[in-house]
């Protein structure tokens, strides 16, 4: 299978992974043969990249860290939990003139918050993710989730939780600590639950006043979690996940020491970011660029590495960034690539995907070329770059190289 941009979708393409509605029902099942009107329907629900079957790529296997079924079930459970809470505390309008309560008004009624928020749903999600990750090899990350706009924050929190847990495994966190890490990241943005609905669309342009309100979500999250008797670890991750190593973050201007996130004896230094948060912050920034909201271009592995390197030290914990960088494969099965040069100049500009990675030399995998330089489909051409030393490649964005129909 291969991931394509929606603009590449053609009648006759066959889905390789099911597409779900925001409500959790399957909209299109794996195996569905696409029709001309499908692109419009997908665009309406905020899906802009999908997985389709591709002849010749039957040997291409993905090693998802958490199964698609589990992720979809978790997304749906978290979405229902959020919607139920907002309805119970009066954040869902019944008519256009209705005045909604402010976050401060809701927080002034802690017993109502405690009764309305189903923390058990988050704990179940954390347990389900931990169960699938506990035997996973933390040496490499591979995430292939799709995105829909309606469930963006739930999908993002689950991806962040997976990345954070894998980093924590590299630092030998105990099983209990790993599950705490997952739960903390799932609840990291819980403060958004108190904000007006229009602020929760990641593609909405906000005024300065609205941006300032949105920046209060760490404080709101901390208050909610303490009211609900969630651990201080989780509450502090919610409070601190936008803090930066140089003290330039918010809301408390805490600082970090760019040290490995290992458990230490004695009290933590006052005014510093806790170790769980330092992992969560790196995971969040990484996910934000490789799996952005629908409508925003996802960055390639190389560009994501460059981005993290720029933030390392001043913004993100440099030790954790270094660990994450060692887990991001240069090329792995399914990555899109473009040929940048070859001895005869015959293949330059051709686009394909990585068929198999090469453990001996990660930047020289086996690839299969699918489009010529004009963007036209070609008979599949498999090349082993370990043998073809004359060929150089780079990552290609979704849609790059494919001819566009007028």
Image: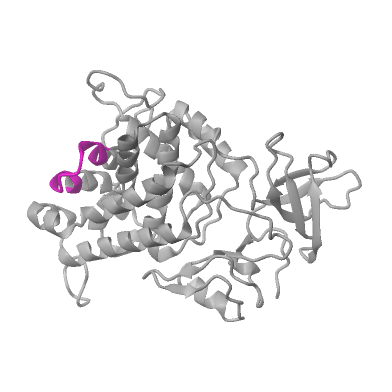
Q: Is residue 185 left or right of residue 317?
A: left
Q: Is residue 270 left or right of residue 313?
A: left
Find out whether residue 234 is within the magenta segment: yes
- Where does residue 181 sit, x and y in percent of width and height? 33, 39
* Helix, strand or loop for the magenta stretch, by majority: helix
Q: Is residue 18 left or right of residue 164?
A: right
Image mark count: 0
The C terminus sits in image quarter: bottom right
Indicate the quadrant where residue 21 lies.
bottom left
**Along the line of sight, the residue nearer the viewer: 384 or 94:** 384
Indicate the quadrant where residue 207 lies.
bottom left
The residue lying at 72 percent from left, 65 percent from top is: 55
- Where does residue 52 sit, x and y in percent of width and height? 62, 66
**Along the line of sight, the residue nearer the viewer: 368 or 244:** 368
The N terminus sits in image quarter: bottom right
**Residue extending furthest toward the top:** 266
**Residue extending furthest toward the right:** 344
**Along the line of sight, the residue nearer the viewer: 242 or 331:** 331
Find out whether residue 100 is within the magenta segment: no
Q: Is residue 243 visible?
A: no
- Where does residue 359 sit, x and y in percent of width and height? 68, 36
The residue lying at 31 percent from left, 35 percent from top is: 177
Magenta region: which residues?
224-236
Q: Is residue 372 above or below residue 142?
A: below
Indicate the quadrant where residue 149 lies.
bottom left
Q: Is residue 81 above or below residue 208?
A: below
């Amino acid at each position: 299978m291969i991931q394509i941009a929606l603009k590449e979708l053609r009648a006759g393409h066959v889905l390789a992974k099911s597409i779900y509605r925001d409500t959790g029902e399957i909209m299109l099942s794996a195996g569905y043969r696409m029709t001309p009107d499908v692109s419009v329907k997908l665009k309406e629900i905020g899906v802009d990249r999908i997985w389709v079957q591709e002849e010749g790529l039957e040997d291409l296997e993905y090693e998802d860290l958490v199964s698609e079924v589990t992720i979809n079930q978790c997304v749906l459970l978290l979405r229902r939990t959020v919607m139920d809470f907002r309805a119970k505390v009066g954040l869902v309008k019944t008519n256009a003139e209705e005045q909604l309560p402010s976050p401060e008004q809701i927080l002034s009624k802690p017993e109502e918050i405690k009764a309305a928020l189903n923390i058990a749903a988050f704990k179940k999600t954390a347990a389900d993710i931990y169960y699938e990750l506990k035997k996973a090899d933390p040496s490499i990350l591979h995430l292939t989730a799709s995105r829909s706009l309606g469930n963006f924050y739930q999908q993002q929190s689950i991806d962040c939780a997976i990345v954070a847990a894998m980093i924590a495994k590299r630092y030998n966190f105990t099983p209990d600590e790993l599950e705490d890490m997952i739960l903390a990241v799932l609840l990291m943005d819980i403060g958004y639950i108190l904000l007006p609905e229009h602020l929760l669309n990641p593609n909405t342009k906000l005024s300065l006043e609205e941006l300032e309100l949105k920046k209060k979500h760490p404080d709101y999250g901390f208050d909610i979690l303490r009211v609900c008797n969630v651990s201080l670890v989780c509450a502090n991750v919610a409070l601190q996940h936008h803090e930066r190593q140089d003290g330039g973050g918010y809301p408390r201007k805490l600082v970090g020491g760019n040290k490995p996130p290992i458990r230490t004896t004695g009290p933590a230094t006052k005014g510093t970011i806790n170790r769980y948060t330092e992992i969560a912050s790196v995971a969040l920034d990484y996910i934000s660029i490789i799996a952005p909201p629908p409508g925003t271009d996802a960055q390639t592995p190389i560009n994501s590495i460059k981005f993290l390197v720029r933030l390392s030290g001043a913004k993100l914990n440099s030790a954790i960034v270094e660990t994450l960088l060692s887990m991001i494969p240069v090329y792995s099965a399914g990555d899109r690539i473009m040929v940048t040069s070859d001895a005869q100049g015959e293949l330059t500009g051709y686009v394909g995907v990585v068929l198999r990675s090469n453990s001996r030399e990660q930047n020289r995998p086996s690839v299969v070329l699918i489009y010529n330089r004009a963007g036209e489909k070609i008979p599949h051409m498999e090349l082993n770059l370990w043998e073809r030393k004359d060929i150089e490649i780079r990552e290609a964005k979704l849609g790059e190289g494919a001819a566009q129909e007028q």
